[in-house]
């Protein structure tokens, strides 16, 4: 509920990591490897987590990688 009430369209990697139960350092490591469980936007030098994606992951327990659900292929 806190995320819905306080976040706009995106939030910080640190806050998203805390919501998912791991450290900020682990969150940034997962972002670097392309394995953060939510959609991540890189805007210049800033990295933001998409709020809607974070909420879906928290509700379903199923990670989303780069906008695709785990186990599914993305068509280009």
Image: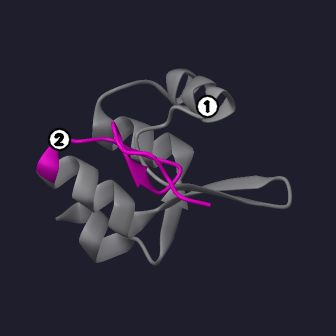
Q: Which mark is residue 61?
A: 2
Badge 1: residue crowd in 10 Å (few <14, some 14–19, many ≥20): some
Question: Where is residue 61 drawn, in percent x and y?
Answer: 17, 41
Residue 18 located within the stretch drawn in magenta: no
Quarter of the image where one finds residue 70: top left
Q: Which mark is residue 18?
A: none
Residue that protrudes farthest toward the front in the picture: 75
Choose between 33 and 3: the one closer to the eye. Answer: 33
Q: CA distance from mark 2 to mark 1?
A: 20 Å
| Residue at the (37%, 37%) spot, across then down | 18
Q: Which residue is mark 1?
A: 28
Q: Which residues are magenta?
A: 60-76
Residue that protrudes farthest toward the right in the picture: 44
Q: Secondary structure at mark 2?
A: loop
| Residue at the (27%, 75%) spot, across then down | 5
Instruction: Determine the main secondary structure of the stretch shown in magenta.
Output: loop
Choose between 26 and 39: the one closer to the eye. Answer: 39
Q: Nearer the viewer, mark 2 or mark 1?
A: 2
Residue 74 located within the stretch drawn in magenta: yes
Q: Secondary structure at mark 1?
A: helix
Question: Where is residue 4 drawn, in percent x and y?
Answer: 26, 71
């Amino acid at each position: 509920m806190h995320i819905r009430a306080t976040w706009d369209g995106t939030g910080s990697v640190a806050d998203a990591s805390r919501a998912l139960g791991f450290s900020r350092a682990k969150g940034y490591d997962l972002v670097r490897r392309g394995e953060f469980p939510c959609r991540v936007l890189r805007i210049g030098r800033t990295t933001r987590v998409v709020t809607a994606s974070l909420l879906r992951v928290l509700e379903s327990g199923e990670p989303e990688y780069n906008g695709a659900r785990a186990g599914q292929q993305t068509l280009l």
